[in-house]
Amino acid sequence: MPLHDKGSVLEFDLKGEGRGVLQEVSIAGSEHTVRAEGHPAFGGTDSAPSPLDYALAAVVSCNQVTARIVALGEEIEIGEFHGRVEAELDNSVLVFGAEGNPNFSSLKLTVEVETALDDAAFERFVAEVNRRCPLTQLFVRSGVDVTTDWTNKALVRS
């Protein structure tokens, strides 16, 4: 049951097939597929992005999509969005079986987005994007030390 009377529950169905550390994942109901290969540190040959690369890329793009959703709901005009994510992962658990958490230890998201908001309104906007972005919250709630640094750039109207 959705949390909001206008909400809906979205379902996802992906299937992967592969060999070694290379896999192709198909998305049900779509012609899209994702090809992923383990990072070279895990035996990959760098023929495709790693699942870790995709997870981090998803954080950047999910923040852009969420920013757009928030902006539309609050009638905020936004222009260009530039994002960067940097993360650290200790491979000791994954590769060597050490005890501990195999997750990323830290993730830093840096964003520059064009708006016409003043500083206070921009801070509220960013807080709402951080609160509502599913992938930001996935990392935060899994214990990753997530930091975000958003910069409000002057909106350039075309």
Image: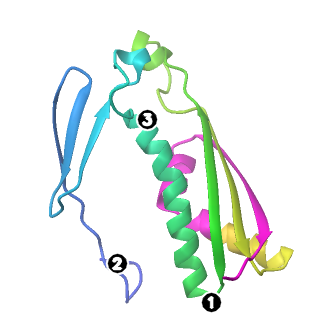
Instruction: Identify the residue position indicated by label 2 in the image.
Output: 2
Q: Which residue shows up at 17% across the image and 58% down it?
A: 31
Inter-mark Cα distance, 1 to 2: 24 Å
Q: Which residue shows up at 20% across the image and 38% down it?
A: 24
Secondary structure beneath dot 2 equals loop
Dot 1: within a 10 Å radius of its alpha carbon, few (fewer than 14), some, or many (20 or more) residues? few
Nearer to us: label 2 or label 3: 3
Closer to the chain start, of discs 1 and 2, is 2
Secondary structure beneath dot 1 equals loop
Instruction: Identify the residue position indicated by label 1 in the image.
Output: 75
Is 110 placed left or right of 129 in the picture?
A: right
Instruction: Identify the residue position indicated by label 3 in the image.
Output: 52
Q: Position of residue 57 (x, y in %)?
A: 48, 47
- The magenta-colored residue range is 129-158
**Farthest residue, direction top:** 96
Q: Position of residue 93 (x, y in %)?
A: 45, 18
The image quadrant of residue 16 is: top left
The image quadrant of residue 2 is: bottom left
